[in-house]
Image (cartoon, grey):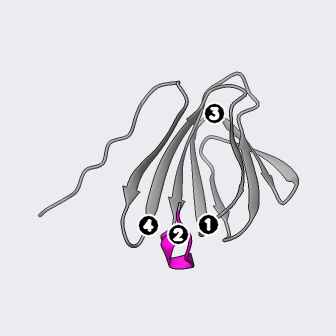
Amino acid sequence: MAIKVYQFKMGTEKCLEQIVNVDMVQINHIILPPQEKVPEHYSNSNVFLIITKGTMTITIEGEPHEYPQGHILAIPYHQRMLIENKTKETLEFFVVKAPHPEKYGTKS
């Protein structure tokens, strides 16, 4: 059986890395130190945010919400969002985009 193995960075320094970029899905890995953020943007696919460490503050269409590790957030296509780490601990999460953003005619 042939498998493809992907690696991602470990640590506490800011990191935004694309791990998987295939026809059907795109998977990114993000580490945000305290008080860091992902700039406000529109989701370019159906997005699933898998929080693996820390607490995420996410503002969707102007409304802020907080979610700790162990949560998966499903964000529909074309939603305005801002992701922040407002805590004193590192925030780490994975971003799964399905279908791949190119299916919507946009790039990551």
Which of the numbered marks, if any, corresponds to residue 54? 3
Q: Are marks 3 and 1 in contact (CB under 8 Å)?
A: no
State which tag comes first along the sequence, 3 or 2.
3
**Which residue is disc 2 drawn over?**
101
x and y percentages locating residue 19 in the rendered image: 39, 50
Question: Viewer-nearest of labels 4 and 2?
Answer: 2
Left or right: 27 as drawn, with respect to 87: left
Look at discs 3 and 2 and give the one toward the viewer: 2
- Compare marks 4 and 1 and give the one earlier in the sequence: 4
Q: Secondary structure at mark 3?
A: loop
Q: Quick check: 7 left or right of 88?
A: left
The residue drawn where x is 63% and y is 33% is 54
Residue 50 relative to residue 62: left or right: left
Disc 4 crowd rating (10 Å Cα; few below 14, some 14-19, many 20+) is some
| Horizontal arrangement in the rendering, residue 38 relative to residue 13 (left or right) | right
Amino acid tagged 1: Asn
Residue 44 highlighted magenta (yes or no): no
**Mark 3 belongs to which amino acid?**
Gly
Residue 106 counted in the magenta span: yes
